[in-house]
Image (cartoon, rainbow, N blue to C red):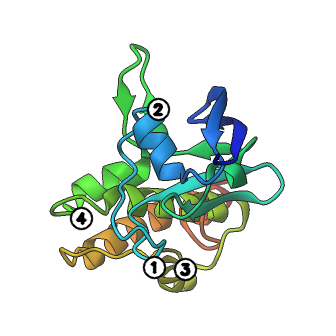
């Protein structure tokens, strides 16, 4: 008889569980088969392509990504997790409002088939959240994007547009770079005073 666990977590801001689950169940299976969260894509099944990337929110470490296809539910028991379904905000009527990353991907026509897009959105979201805590110089943005998204595989070769979209979000969002728009505003205010 297979070992089982009592699983509880916060997924996209909602408490899930306790659920009686097989100990060796992978997170992608829980999301798709038990919770009907089908946006996380199963592709390689080996944790290599990053299509199944989900976000783990840790109060101490900050957010980080894990591949849902090779990450067991036992490892995420008790944790807070975000999937692609939890990235968009909500308007007053409860309708979805795309995140800045999602908007930029649409504006740049970053994807073709879109199979890899949830992984790219989650990877770029974690990068932006990291930069909110630890801004970098604008001349380091390209390297930071490459480091954050290098493991993501796009079979339609949409890398350039994904990277351009993420770069535009980072360079246009105050507080993500140490010499970006917020510093221009401060300098303008000092000149006018």
Please identify the quarter of the rendering in which residue 75 is found.
bottom right
Q: Residues within 10 Å of mark 2 (few under 14, many from 20)?
A: few
From the viewer's perspective, is 71 left or right of 162? right
Please identify the quarter of the rendering in which residue 36 is found.
top left
**Residue 55, how many percent across, how many down?**
58, 54
Q: Residues within 10 Å of mark 4 (few under 14, many from 20)?
A: many
Residue designated by label 4:
110
Q: Residues within 10 Å of mark 1 (few under 14, many from 20)?
A: some
- Identify the residue at image location x=41%, y=41%: 32
Look at the numbered discs 1 and 2 and tell me whether their residues touch, using CB distance below 8 Å: no
- Identify the residue at image location x=36%, y=50%: 102
Q: Nearer the viewer, mark 3 or mark 1?
A: 1
Q: Which sits in the foreground, 89 or 65?
A: 65
Residue designated by label 3:
144
Between marks 3 and 2, how big is the CA–CA gap?
33 Å
- Identify the residue at image location x=32%, y=59%: 117
Between marks 1 and 4, how big is the CA–CA gap?
17 Å
**Residue 38, how many percent across, how many down?**
36, 42
From the viewer's perspective, is 182 left or right of 160? right
Residue 139 visible? The answer is yes
Q: Earlier in the sequence, mark 2 or mark 4?
A: 2
Q: Nearer the viewer, mark 1 or mark 4?
A: 1
Residue designated by label 1:
151
Q: Nearer the viewer, mark 3 or mark 2?
A: 2
Between marks 3 and 1, how big is the CA–CA gap?
13 Å
- Relative to 91, say whether 171 is above or below: below
Residue designated by label 2:
35
């Amino acid at each position: 008889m297979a070992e089982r666990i009592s699983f509880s977590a916060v997924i996209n801001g909602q408490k899930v569980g306790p659920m009686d689950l097989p100990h060796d169940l992978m997170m992608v299976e829980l999301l798709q088969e038990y919770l009907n969260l089908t946006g996380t894509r199963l592709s390689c099944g080996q944790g290599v392509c990053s299509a199944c990337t989900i976000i783990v929110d840790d109060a101490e470490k900050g957010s980080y990504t894990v591949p849902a296809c090779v990450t067991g539910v036992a490892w995420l028991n008790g944790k807070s997790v975000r999937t692609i379904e939890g990235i968009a905000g909500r308007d007053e009527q409860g309708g979805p409002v795309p995140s800045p990353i999602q908007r930029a991907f649409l504006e740049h026509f970053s994807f073709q088939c879109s199979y890899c897009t949830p992984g790219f959105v989650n990877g770029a979201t974690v990068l932006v959240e990291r930069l909110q805590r630890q801004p970098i110089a604008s001349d380091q943005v390209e390297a930071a994007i490459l480091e954050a998204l290098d493991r993501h595989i796009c079979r339609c070769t949409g890398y350039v547009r994904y990277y351009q979209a993420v770069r535009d979000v980072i360079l246009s969002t105050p507080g993500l770079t140490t010499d970006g728009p917020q510093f221009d505003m401060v300098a303008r205010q000092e000149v006018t005073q």
